[in-house]
Amino acid sequence: MKNIKAIGLILLALLTGLAAAVYAAGWISRQGGIASNKVVVAAVDIELGSRVNAQMLTTVDWPSGSVPNGSFGEIKALQDRVVKVGVLRGEALMEGKLAPVGTQGGLSAVIASGKRAMTVRVNDVVGVAGFALPGNYVDVMVNAQQDKGRGEEALQISKTVLEKVLVLAVAQEANRDDTKPKVVSAVTLELSLEDSEKLDLARSVGTLSLVLRNQMDKTTVATDGITKGQLFGAKEIVQVSTAAAPTPARPRVRHAGPAAQPASQCVEVIQHSGSSLTCF
């Protein structure tokens, strides 16, 4: 009796194993029948602004139904192209991540169309303690003497002159994957041509400060700036120029003789070119 049970269990195990093997073989054959295409991916991490070569790339099989738009099927199609964003290992290279054909490598490849790159000198305070990293956005503030009219005292004013400015690079590094603070002596910003002129004037007339802002915050706030008097709550004194009031003219009294006595009534007689005063 015991042998029959043991044989039954063995047969059941064999049937179960056979069924699993048949199912696995069918699944493998179905997977092999799925259509796939070759897609070029990064074989190593590629930093933005780098020129791509064959050693940086490889191809993998990608299901035809989920091939990324703008991807490439051959490595030679990407020869000498420049990436304008950082690409991680195993990530597919697409046209949207590449600079136009013929673009030279370097920082100029990552500047947006119509924009300019401008570098300003900073220290640990101006550079927000090294937290103004590539890919972050900052506001630019200037502290300067405000011009006044003739005879008026110049006022010290602090004002935000530029908002939501993209940091392209710090020192000579443009890698946006690093989040560790770096205290550097220069920061390169991406600006329009008009904003470049503003920044150039601002750094020549006063002291610049960078104000780090949230990357998702796109709100702009127009301010009038603040003076030292407003900062400490001093009331502004308005100078009012008052013209001197005209002095009333004194009545001219004609005297008859060197010692004329006051009288209650006087009569002036005008005859030809002369006149005489007679008092009663």
Image (spheres, rainbow, N blue to C red):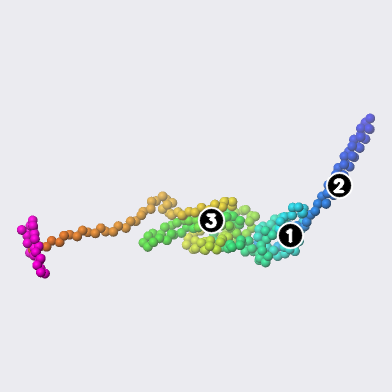
The percent position of residue 23, horizontal first and vertical second, equals 85, 44
Question: Helix, strand, or loop for circle 3?
Answer: strand
Residue bounds of the magenta highlight: 257-280
Q: Which residue is mark 1?
A: 72
Q: Which residue is pictured at 58% across the width and 58% down the height?
A: 167
Q: Which residue is pictured at 36% across the width and 61% down the height?
A: 151
Q: Which residue is mark 3?
A: 163
Furthest toward the bottom, the residue is: 273
Q: Which residue is mark 2?
A: 25
Left or right placement of residue 120 versus residue 148 in this view: right
Q: Which of these two is toward me, 142 or 192?
A: 192
Quick one: label 2 or label 1, which is nearer the N terminus? 2
Question: Helix, strand, or loop for circle 1?
Answer: loop
Question: Helix, strand, or loop for circle 2?
Answer: helix
Q: Which mark is residue 153?
A: none
For disc 2, the neighbor class at 10 Å (few under 14, some 14 to 19, many from 20) is few
Left or right placement of residue 69 versus residue 144 in this view: right
Amino acid under disc 3 = Glu
- Vertical side of 220 occupied by 119: above or below: below
Q: Nearer the viewer, mark 1 or mark 3?
A: 1
The percent position of residue 211, horizontal first and vertical second, equals 53, 54
Q: Which residue is pictured at 54% across the width and 59% down the height?
A: 122
Give yes or no for residue 265 being in the magenta stretch. Answer: yes
